[in-house]
Amino acid sequence: MTETIFYLIAGSIMLIAIWHHMTSLNKKAAAYDKVHKDAIEAGLTEPPSLHPVVDLSICMGSGACVTSCPEAAMGVIKGKALLISPSHCIGHGACETACPVGAIKLVFGTEKRGMDIPNVTPEFETDVPGLFIAGELGGMGLIRNAVKQGSQSIRTIAARPRTKADLDVLIVGAGPSGIAASLAAKQSNLRFITIDQEDSFGGTTYHYPRNKLVMTEPMDLPLIGLIKARELSKEQLMEIWNDVVKRAGLLIQFSEKMEEITQQDNGFIVRTNKTSYFTSNVLLAIGRRGTPRKLGAKGEDLAKVVYRLVEAEQYRNMHVLVVGGGDSALEAALDVSEEAGTVVTLSYRSEAFSRVKPKNRHRLDAAVAEKRIRVELQSTVEEIAPDQVILKKGDAVLELKNDAVIVCAGGELPIPMLKKIGIKVESRYGT
Ligand SMILES: Cc1cc2nc3c(=O)[nH]c(=O)nc-3n(C[C@H](O)[C@H](O)[C@H](O)COP(=O)(O)OP(=O)(O)OC[C@H]3O[C@@H](n4cnc5c(N)ncnc54)[C@H](O)[C@@H]3O)c2cc1C
């Protein structure tokens, strides 16, 4: 009798534990399903870079990939792992390592959208001798890879004989890869110049959202040594870059955009928006965000036109036009509209905001209802004048008072230029 009671109690405890476990799994699966559906609804189904593909015939739904993913991009639905939030995946690859049954492989591009990956040697040299590519442009994301590749490519350059060119290397880009490359170039006493099209170093890391948690691994920076941080905020990371650049005395030439590279006499002529350089090597550390896409409108070169929002506060009491239909355009318009006295118009050439996060869409609907933002769909910018902008909408012409224009129309990678100088670029569709 006692034995029967014992088995009954033990059995009941087991059943309750299983029930709890199943309920918790179902709850989690429902939450993952919602995230996945939201991503599909927002049209955010394409991962930007290296990302996991799960072999469903092997996956046993352990959830190890979910726990390991620092960006919360994975989920388990109906017992199988899935990339539920593709646009958040930045290729950490932790899921592949964590999977106990080897069901995950990392690939570039998807069936729908190819990803152009330039050919490089293990030393990061392209098919054009003397032209190197390091960091995310080469396909591999992450700060630690960018830093490693930036330093390694410079070591290869430093080991080669000097030529008569004015520079040993022109480093294009001052993101993690370009910073590490510049440190390595300084350490090796190379004649080098580093340029960046923006007004700050840090590259993509400079654009992370405020307080973003950055996951990285210890980085070995030439001249500086090992930076041991693994988890830090965007602001702490920017402080590190600041300190590193100051300590090493790096001089980075900002607001200088590389526009064209041509081969010449054992070297290259690199034309920028400011000047030209004759250099024996070029290191492209330009990432994959590209150069902000311009509108091609009359007056776009006025100083009041910018291509990203830095501080919303600076637009207080101003008439602001935001152009674009993606999350960054919506977020810029919303942030500016929260500042006192702003009159914000959001202009987008399509008929709907089809590829934005539901959260931003809801915030925009509320802002429009509160008359904080005026939305002009199917409109294009005709002209930007010092105190007004002219929009074209069908046959109508809208003249709006204007003090500032923020264009968020995406970026363009210089892939055609790379191909033109002879670099082989492979389009990957999920391989
Ligand atoms: C939202 C988000 C979160 C992320 N979180 C993490 C994380 O937690 N951990 C992690 O390891 N990685 C993270 N990453 C990825 C990481 O930021 C990138 O892999 C890394 O910054 C790539 O470094 P890079 O130097 O190759 O390129 P970038 O950082 O993109 O820098 C390229 C630089 O080149 C400049 N440039 C481009 N074109 C030109 C031109 N024609 N002329 C002159 N200059 C030019 C740009 O202005 C830029 O400064 C994240 C990425 C994103 C988008």
Image: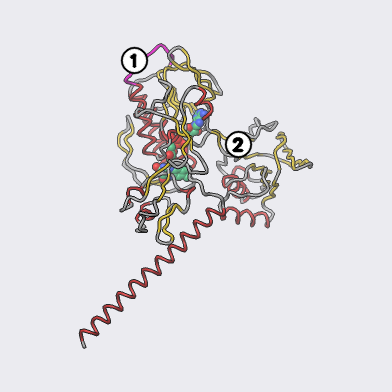
In the image, the segment drawn in magenta is 158-166
Q: Quadrant of the N terminus?
A: bottom left
Residue 269 rendering spot, x and y as whole percentages:
49, 17
Residue 353 rendering spot, x and y as whole percentages:
63, 49
Quick one: which residue is furthest to the bottom in this view? Answer: 1
For the residue with label 1, is its CB less than 8 Å from the closest atom of ligand 1? no
Give the residue type that dot 2 points to: Val
Residue 105 rendering spot, x and y as whole percentages:
37, 46
Q: Residues within 10 Å of mark 2 (few under 14, many from 20)?
A: some
Residue 389 rendering spot, x and y as whole percentages:
72, 38
Element assignment for label 1: loop
Q: Please tell me which residue lies in front, 38 or 321.
A: 38
Residue 27 in sight in this render: yes
Q: Quadrant of residue 174?
A: top left
Left or right: residue 407 versus residue 129 is: right
Q: Residue at x 36, y 57 (%)?
A: 63
Q: Residues within 10 Å of mark 1 (few under 14, many from 20)?
A: few
Q: Please tell me which residue lies in front, 316 or 379.
A: 379
Per the image, the residue denoted by label 2 is: 306
Element assignment for label 2: strand
Magenta part mainly helix, strand or loop?
Answer: loop
Image marks 1 and 2: residues in contact by CB distance under 8 Å: no
* Residue 28 to residue 237: above or below: below
Q: Residue at x 63, y 43 (%)?
A: 324
Mark 1, mark 2: which one is toward the viewer? 1
Q: Residue at x 41, y 47 (%)?
A: 52
Per the image, the residue denoted by label 1 is: 161
Q: Quadrant of the C terminus?
A: top left
Cα–Cα span, label 1 and label 2: 42 Å
Q: Quadrant of residue 282?
A: top left
